[in-house]
Amino acid sequence: MAVVKPFRAYRYAPNIIEDMTSVVTQPYDKINDEMQVEYYKRSKYNIIRVIKGKRFTDDSEQNNVYTRAAKYLREWIERGILIRDSKPSIYIYDQEYKDDMGRRLTRKGFIALGKLEEYSESGVKPHERTLSKPKEDRFNLMKATNANFGQVFMLYTDPEKKIDRLLARFREEEPDMKALDWQGEIHKLWKVEDAEMIQKIEGYMKDKTLLIADGHHRYETALNYKRYMIEKIGKTVENAPFFYRMMTFVNTEDEGLTIFPTHRLIFNCDRDVKTFLDTLKRDFFIEEIQFFPEDKFEELERLKMRMRERHSKEKEHVFGLYLKGIGSYFLLTLKNTKRMDELIPDASDAYKSLDVVILHKLILEDILRIDAEKLKEQMNIDYERYLDEAVRRVDANDKYQMLFILNPTRIENVKGTAEAGERMPQKSTDFYPKLLTGFTINLLAKE
């Protein structure tokens, strides 16, 4: 059972911030050093100063990245840079973008508060494992600011699209907020304060199970903060602000729901190429695709298209392989799925059918002898979303010996794995585009 409710978000004052592009950011964990510098330049009110501010060598317990975040938030509210909406609302959040096949799509969602539940309960399912360090960082920020900034991306299933139909008329109007992002994505936000409509949405969501698509660290941080506050103040009421977390809800039936693959670059692997390919033949049909240097990336695009077609039409488990110093790509097709029954007999069918699990268990662990702990610690593996860039990295860096090219994970596989109570390997899903930070802020204070 999913419990959602409206809230009075803090938002940037439109009379002061005319261009939202200048103040919003990617999620904190996607922001590298160069992006941080760029965000700082865009505006002195950019949310980067709060969610991922600069650290200094003379930082102390009294003056550090978290105390400065709290100071910026407090000052911006006091000066009217951030203004709280007058009525509890939900916020339609749509994203227009191009996927990696060049199609123009729109992903539709809405922002509201979702009640925090432990994973053992029926309402919320994770699908990825988390790391302790990011959660510690986000927890310190929550303690300092008493607020939510980034979104937790939640999936629910509504084949009839009842909520989309309810909200359709708002989307016909000009959005209240609009921003552009790095890849040309257009992000739009509409405020909905109609109490009757919100009540209907709350009712529609009551029977839904939620799946965390993105933001596992943020969700688990909110759970930790809830436990911390209960311990701090003792017995508390169920509707205390810290029992809820700001979330973006998207229907799994939405046509704009896109998952990108994350390709695997392998290093510190001394296997002989011929021996490796011969060993692969035990479990895979192998097709070699030779190319001239000038045709490398055209052939790569054709390989990607073939993989996608066989993935969607034939439901085959296919992988691309690029070996350093060899003018060929290799198309690998799994011969028999029963191999996965032998390797991981106790796993669910949904888990065993994941391409990323087949790659990790059968090729990386069983054939290349890179064990799960090394993969977890990234002792032999790096990740890359962009396929062209992955090939360039192998060519330009002596570090890498090979690249494995993946198809996107299907949403039904993500759902099946989560429902079976299993967690996927790291970097199994890359939901695109990311939800921007800065459109709405949830201050954990009573109404």
Image (tube, rainbow, N blue to C red):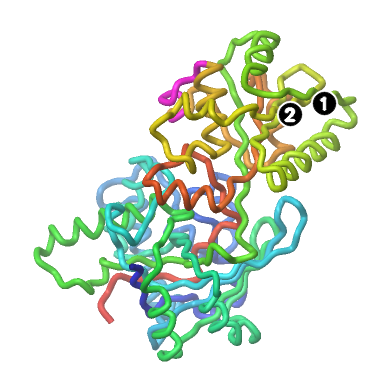
Most common secondary structure along the magenta stretch: helix
Do the residues under discs 1 and 2 have CB atoms within 8 angstroms?
Answer: yes
Q: Residue at the location (47% across, 67% down)?
A: 249
Quadrant of the frame with the C terminus: bottom left
Find the magenta span and give its range. 369-376
- The residue type indicated by label 2 comes to Leu
* Residue 21 visible in this rendered orientation of the protein: no
Position in image of residue 176 (x %, y %): 57, 81
**Residue 66 placement: quadrant:** bottom left
Badge 1 element: strand
Q: Residues within 10 Å of mark 2 (few under 14, many from 20)?
A: many
* N-terminal label among 1 and 2: 1
Residue 378 at what x, y percent from top left? 48, 28
Q: Which residue is mark 1?
A: 289
* Residue designated by label 2: 331
- Write the residue at 73% across / 39% down: 307
